[in-house]
Amino acid sequence: MSYELPNPDPCAPRHYRGRFAPSPSGPLHFGSLVAALGSCLEARCRGGEWLVRMEDVDAPRTVPGAASTILRSLEAYGFAWDGPVLWQSQRLAAYGEALAQLQAAELAYPCGCSRKEIAEGGGGRSVDGAPRYPGICRHGLPPGRQVRAWRLAVPDIEVDFEDGLLGPCRQNLQQNVGDFVLLRADGQYAYQLAVVVDDAFQGITHVVRGADLLDSTPRQLWLQDCLAAPRPAYVHLPLATNEAGEKLSKQTRAPALDDADPGPALYRALAFLGQEPPLELSRAGQVELWAWALAHWQLDKVPARRSIVLPA
């Protein structure tokens, strides 16, 4: 079964379409707000659409009720999205079709290695700090091995792209990442596969997101090429980090957004993104702040950095 794209004509004009894709592993925090605000403002100020996708494909990490909490927070902060929310948990068949296409093209192969074997395999570390897969099963499962996962075979080439803030970016997939997982040993489809399939399905033309995903972009670009999917343009916004340099997240105990009083956090997020909102708006409500932001948003004012430390 082939994986069909919604707009197969590469010469057809592409209306701007962006998205915000949170994982329902907990409530939104300030870092989430920065990513949502930057992506939404860039879409709206370019006359485009802005979609919301719930990236709940990783069932073990999904917290019951978190998705509803996230959507309520977005509404409380004045976000309005186009069309219905897309739920990855409802698109497993599409990921299966994409994997089958890669298998049929002999681009994906079965892997029987355990985490321990990969860690001790001498492959070093990938760009995201995880053990780099040493290619044990690349040319066939060793005798007695059972299939645990499916991986994408990546070539020894440089993948280049132009980030809208950070400029030219380059990564050698084989040397910096290695053959990466498409279907995990626990039966869960990997984020890299799901996001590429969904961006193509939704016709996403521009991805504006946090710089924590910058190192994933070359993998996604290569997957897009393997699936004959169009490449979106990418912008990676600076990450909000604590004084220890840790990304704000549930793991680093980032406080949840205050839905009852969204104005202060919106003001701080605009300032964090370099937009310089006037001081008199520091006590404004979300309606007034959105009106100002939509009239004054400029992407080239956003700091071209991978992270910014927030004061305690």
Image: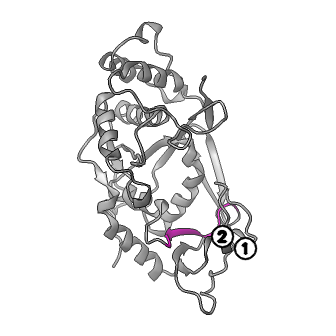
Q: Quadrant of residue 130?
A: bottom right
Q: Can residue 107 be seen in the rendering of this structure?
A: no
Q: Amino acid at mark 2?
A: Tyr
- Quadrant for the N terminus in the image: bottom left
Q: Are marks 1 and 2 in contact (CB under 8 Å)?
A: yes
Q: Secondary structure at mark 1?
A: loop
Q: Which mark is residue 89?
A: none
Q: Is residue 307 above or below residue 116?
A: above
Q: Is residue 296 above or below residue 210?
A: above
Q: Secondary structure at mark 2?
A: loop
- Quadrant for the C terminus in the image: top right
Q: Amino acid at mark 1?
A: Gly
Q: Which mark is residue 121?
A: 1
Give the residue at mark 2. Answer: 133
Task: Please state the horizontal and vertical placement of residue 288, each as a whole percent of the image.
Answer: 32, 15
Q: Nearer the viewer, mark 1 or mark 2?
A: 1
Q: Residue at x 61, y 78 (%)?
A: 113
Task: Please state the horizontal and vertical placement of residue 63, each as a whole percent of the image.
Answer: 38, 50
* Cα–Cα span, label 1 and label 2: 8 Å
Indicate whether residue 177 is drawn in magenta: yes
Badge 1, how many Cα within 10 Å: few under 14, some, many 20+?
some
Badge 2, how many Cα within 10 Å: few under 14, some, many 20+?
many
Q: Quadrant of residue 176?
A: bottom right
Q: Nearer the viewer, residue 65 or 94?
A: 65
Where are the magenta residues, as a range?
Answer: 176-185
Dot 1 or dot 2: first in sequence order is 1
Q: Is residue 212 above or below residue 119?
A: above
Q: Residue at x 39, y 62 (%)?
A: 197
Indicate whether residue 189 is drawn in magenta: no
Q: Nearer the viewer, residue 301 or 20?
A: 20
Q: Nearer the viewer, residue 134 or 197?
A: 134
Q: Residue at x 46, y 71 (%)?
A: 186
